[in-house]
Amino acid sequence: MKLVIAATGASGSIYLQRLLEQIDTVAHEIHLVLSGHAKQVAKQELGAFKIPKGIVQYGESDLNVPFVSGSARFDAMVIVPCSMATLGRIASGSSDTALLRAADVFLKERRKLIVVPRETPWNLIHARNIVTLLEAGAVVLPAIPSFYSRPTSLVDVVDTVVWRILDQIGLPSSRAYRWADQTSRRGARKKP
């Protein structure tokens, strides 16, 4: 697969870090765009943000990248975390950065665009922008973890969201907890 992964300045850099760590960069082509604020937040939250080998990184103002044209074939784009400011710009059709232009291209070409907002609570403007993106064909996947897998660490909690992102891309993780019929116990993962 050819993927564009982007991040904005919302809190939640650990989601991006864990997503990048769980995609096989030998089997898949990954293009990364970080906004200036995303870099600042990642440094504050993670200390050292690590980009796995094989990932190509671009500046947010570089519009000479392949994924900003509809003629370039890409499979999916994920914006994680996605600030409400970026979500609103995408909903309005703004395309003045590589990240925004790419999101616009993915919507117009009917390619999978997944936005992962982490901000809460929402105001009415946020909700309307989300509805606009849903109507335009985007997948809005808020960074809301699940707990039925009984996570025992922060990374386990974060991974519950990352697994949902991977499912949406079409790259499910073999480690992902899957809900099963508890009476049959088929497919249920046991916790220690």
Image: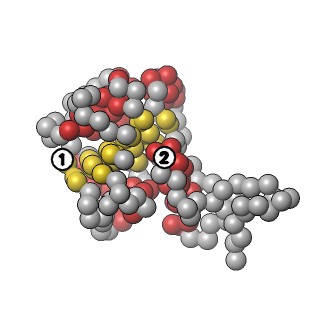
Q: x%, y% of residue 71?
A: 24, 29
Q: Nearer the viewer, residue 90 or 127?
A: 90
The nearer-to-camera label among 1 and 2 is 2
Q: Are marks 1 and 2 in contact (CB under 8 Å)?
A: no
Return the x and y of residue 25 as percentages of the image width and height: 33, 59
Q: Is residue 174 left or right of residue 34?
A: right
What kind of residue is marked 2?
A: Gly
- On the question of residue 88 being in view, the answer is no
Q: Which one is nearer the viewer's eye here, 162 or 96?
A: 162
Pinpoint residue 54: horizontal percent, then vertical percent.
26, 60
- For badge 1, the amino acid type reads Gly
Q: Residues within 10 Å of mark 2 (few under 14, many from 20)?
A: few
**Crowding at label 1, few (<14), some or many (≥20) Cα neighbours within 10 Å?**
some
With respect to residue 3, does 68 lie above or below? above
The residue closer to the viewer here, 27 or 48, is 27
Up the image or down, 181 lies above or below 62; here it is: below
Mark 2: secondary structure: loop
Q: Residue 68 occupies which quadrant of the picture?
A: top left
Residue 64 vertical placement versus 165 (above, below)? above
Location of the C terminus by quadrant is bottom right
The residue indicated by pointer 2 is 170
Tag on residue 59?
1
Residue drawn at point x = 19 percent, y = 48 percent: 58
Q: Is residue 102 visible?
A: yes
Q: Residue at the far bottom: name it.
A: 192
